[in-house]
Image (spheres, helix red, strand yellow):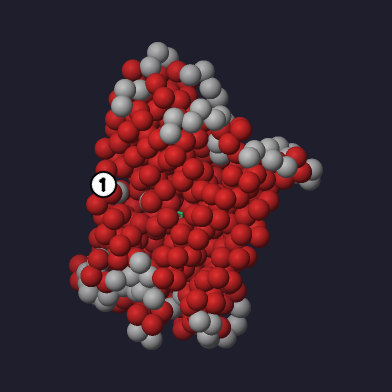
Amino acid sequence: MSSNTRGSWGSRFGFVLAAAGSAVGLGHIWRFPYVTGENGGAAFVILYILCVFMIGVPILFAELSLGRHSHKNPVGAIKAIAPHGVWKYLGYLGVATGLFILSYYTLIAGWTFGYIFKTLLQNPVTFDDFSTNAPLNALLYVIFLLMTIGVVYGGIRGGIERWSKILMPILPVILIFIIIYSLTLEGAMEGVRFYLRPDFSVITGETIMIALGQAFFANSLGMGAMITYGSYLDKKENIIAAGTTVVAFGIVISFLAGFAIFPAVFAMGKSPAEGAALVFVILPEIFEAMPGGLLIGTLFFLLLAIAALTSAISLLEVPVAFLIDERKMRRKVATWLVGGITLIFGIPSALSFGASDFFSNLPFWTDQSFFGMMDYIFGSIALPLGGMLFSIFVAWRWGLVGANKEIALGNETFLGIQSKMWGIVIKYICPIVIFFVFLFQTGLLTW
Ligand code: TRP
C-alpha cells in the first residue's frame, strides 16, 4: 500500500524531523524533570541515560526496521510476519497504549496551551487554582484534542513540520536562558548537587522501572509509534543515523530541562518531588522574576505546545492507522472515533488534580490519582513490556537476517560489526534486562 493513501508524512520534509517531532515533547520537558525529582535526582539521570542507550536505541532500530519492512501499523506489521497466532496481540497492546497515553498527554498539553496565555497576560492564577478549574481544563483539553485531530485528519502536516523545523532549534536556546537565570538564584547550588551528584542509595527496583519507562516514553518507543513512522520511511534513508540523531537531540533537551528546573526548585525552597505539577509550579515563578521573563516565558510555552502537538499526533496516528489498515475504516471516521474514546478517558485524568476527591486520591491506591495511575500503568509499565515483546518478536520471530537486511538498505556499513552487536543486544540483552527490571519492580527479586 502506498504510504500516501494511509496519510503519510510528506517524505520531502525528511524522516528525522517527523521522528524527532514525535519523540521530543512533554516527555522531555515536563515528564523527565518530574520523575527525576520524584526518584532521587542524579542517580536517576544516570540510570535514565543508561536505559536510553542500552535498551532504547536498539529497540528504536528494531521498531523502525519492522515498520519500514512491512509498511504497516503495529498490528499489520506483526501480521505481515506472523499472520497467525498470538503475536498480533502485541500490536493491539501498542494501539491501546497509544490511546491511553494520549488521553492524559492531551491534558498536560492543554495546560501548556493555557500557560501561553497565562504568561502572556501575566495572569497570577496559581497552579492549584488552575488545575482545579474543571471547565477551564475541559476547554483546554478539547481545544488541544481538536488541534491534534485536525492535523491527523486534515493533513496540515507540511505546515506543522515546517514550523517545527524552524522552531524546535529555538527550544534549547530558551532553556539555556532559563538555566543561566536559575543558576544565579540563591541556593541554586543545592539543586545542581541534587541533579548532578548521584546518591545510589536511593535506587530501588521501582526507580529502575521508572527510568526504563521514561526511556521508552521520551523516545516514543514500546507501542509501535516508531513502527508506524518507519512504515512511511523511504528505503534509502539511514535508520541508524536518523534514529541516533533523534535520541541525541532528546537527551540534550531533557538534560537542559532538568538543569533549568532543579536549581530553581531548591532556591525557592520547594520539593523536587512535587509530582506532575513540578514544571508548571516552578517555571511561571522563574518567568515572573527573570528579566525578559514575559517574552521568554510566552515563547517557551508556545514552543512546548507545538512540541506537544507533534508528539500527540504520533500517539493518535497509531490507533488511527490501525483502524484504517486493519478495519478498513475511513480516516475521518477513525480519527473521530479514537478522539472520542480519548476524551472519555481524559475526563477522570483532568479531574485528578483536585477537582474531584475521588480521582485525585484513588481509594484503592495510596497516594495515587487517576492520572498518576494511568501514567504509571501505561507510561512506566506498558511501554517497557511492549518494548520487551517487540525485541523478542524482531530477534526471534522475524529473525535477525531479515532485520539486518532492512536496516542495511540505506546503510551498507551496518552489516559489519554493528549488526553483530545490535543482534546480541536485541536478541538477549533487551529482553533479559527488561524482564529482570520487572522482577525487581514487582519485588519478586531484591538486591
Ligand atoms: N515521546 C513523546 C514525548 O516525549 C510522547 C510520545 C509520542 C510517546 N509518541 C509516543 C510516548 C509513543 C510513548 C509512545 O513527549
What is the quadrant of residue 236 in the picture? Answer: bottom left
Element at label 1 = loop
Q: Residue at x 24, y 52 (%)?
A: 166
What is the quadrant of residue 263 in the picture? Answer: top left
In this picture, residue 11 sits left or right of residue 123: left
Q: Which residue is mark 1?
A: 169
The image shows residue 443 at horizontal and vertical percentages of: 67, 45
Amino acid type, mark 1 = Pro
Please, is residue 119 above or below residue 227 in the view? above
Q: Residue at x 45, y 65 (%)?
A: 150
In this picture, residue 234 sits left or right of residue 432: left
Please, is residue 201 above or below residue 13 in the view? above
Q: Residue at x 53, y 22 (%)?
A: 270
Q: Is mark 1 within 8 Å of ligand 1?
A: no
Q: How many marks?
A: 1
In this picture, residue 79 sits left or right of residue 226: right
Q: Nearer the viewer, residue 262 or 151?
A: 151
Q: Residue at x 49, y 54 (%)?
A: 144
Q: Neighbour class for label 1 at 10 Å: few (<14), some, many (≥20)?
A: few
Q: Nearer the viewer, residue 114 or 11?
A: 114
